[in-house]
Image (cartoon, grey):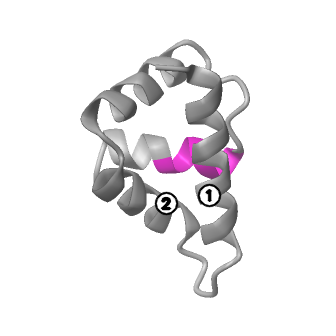
Amino acid sequence: MDTGRLVRMANQIATFFASQPGGRGAEETAAHLRAFWDPRMREALFAHLDAGGEGLSPLAREAAERLRHPA
């Protein structure tokens, strides 16, 4: 997986959901990643988080953590 591309996509998704009303950006971003990203993409995102998560926006990082550890 191209980590740079995954980071860019996760940030774009997070930016979209951040602009939606309701203040549920991280939750909605995590739901989108769960529904539409292939398991290999999610695992690559988790590996990137484990390596420091460079380049991820705060909202994308929070969404990835929620996806990895659902409440």
Indicate whether residue 60 is drawn in magenta: yes
- Image quarter of residue 10: top right
Query: Is residue 53 something one can see in this rendering?
Result: no
Residue at the (28%, 51%) spot, across then down: 70
Residue 33: image x %, image y %? 40, 52
Residue 51: image x %, image y %? 55, 12
Q: Residues within 10 Å of mark 2 (few under 14, many from 20)?
A: many
Q: In this view, does 41 lie to the left or right of 58?
A: left
Number of numbered discs on residues: 2
- Looking at the picture, tell me which residue is in the foreground, 12 or 55: 12
- Mark 2 — residue? 29
Q: Is residue 70 left or right of residue 62?
A: left
Q: Is residue 44 above or below residue 8?
A: above
- Give me the disc on residue 14: 1
Whether residues under marks 1 and 2 lie with C-beta atoms below 8 angstroms apart, the answer is: yes
Residue at the (70%, 61%) spot, across then down: 15
Considering the numbered disc 2 on the image, is that residue within a helix, a strand or a loop? helix
Q: In this view, does 14 lie above or below 7?
A: below
* Sequence-earlier tag: 1 or 2: 1
- Image quarter of residue 46: top left
Name which residue type carries label 2. Answer: Thr
